[in-house]
Amino acid sequence: MTSLPENKKIVLFDGVCNLCDGAVKFIIEHDKKDVFRFASLQSEFGQKLIAERGLDPEELDSVVLIEPGVAYYRKSTAALEISRELSGGYSLLKNFLLLPEGFRDLIYDFVANNRYKWYGKKESCMIPTPELKAKFLDY
């Protein structure tokens, strides 16, 4: 199994998606407790984490949150679990976990399926600044 940083939650994201890129920047900005580390789904590291959890990389087109030694979450559940750790009122978004997962994922899938059309796509994953490089596991 891949060695993961202790006491950190891993966010796997679509590295070529502008919406996802913006979401990662947002998470970093509001991660005052330094809880998260990041890797793109397309990276070798991301692919290894996906395989270790028995997930089909062809079915993953958005966010996965991995809590090492605990669980992993996908889609709307991953996004809402991430929100629990964010500063400001964003942690209140966790209350949407009370809604049925199927309903939440319908909305999530609608946005995910249209994200390239609405927000665009990059040719390659973002390159973090030297200050942020420590937060990314695939560099």
Image (tube, rainbow, N blue to C red):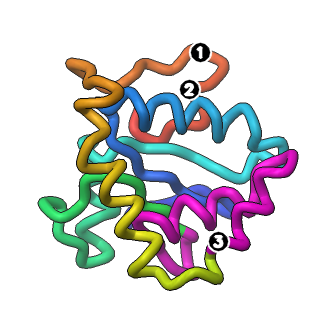
Q: Quadrant of the C terminus?
A: top left
Q: Which residues are magenta?
A: 67-96
Q: Which label was assigned to residue 101?
A: none
Mark 2 and mark 1 residues within 8 Å of each other at the beta carbon: yes
Q: Is residue 131 above or below residue 81?
A: above
Q: Which element type, helix, strand or loop, lies under badge 2?
A: helix
**Earlier residue among tags 2 and 3:** 3
Q: Residue at x 75, y 43 (%)?
A: 31
Q: Which label was assigned to residue 96?
A: 3
Q: Amino acid at mark 1?
A: Pro
Q: In the current view of this chain or complex, which residue is farthest to the top?
A: 129
> x, y percentage for residue 132?
62, 25
> x, y percentage for residue 116?
25, 33
Q: CA distance from mark 1 to mark 3?
A: 35 Å
Horizontal relation, residue 119 to residue 79: left or right: left
Q: Which element type, helix, strand or loop, lies under badge 3?
A: helix
Query: Is residue 70 magenta-colored?
Result: yes
Q: Nearer the viewer, mark 2 or mark 3?
A: 3
Residue wearing tag 2 = 133
Q: Nearer the viewer, mark 1 or mark 3?
A: 3
**Earlier residue among tags 1 and 3:** 3
Q: Amino acid at mark 2?
A: Lys
Q: CA distance from mark 2 to mark 1?
A: 5 Å
Residue wearing tag 1 = 130
Query: Is residue 98 magenta-colored?
Result: no
Q: In the current view of this chain or complex, which residue is farthest to the right?
A: 88
Give the overall secondary structure of the magenta segment. helix
In this view, the residue in front, 134 or 96, is 96
Q: Residue at x 51, y 29 (%)?
A: 22
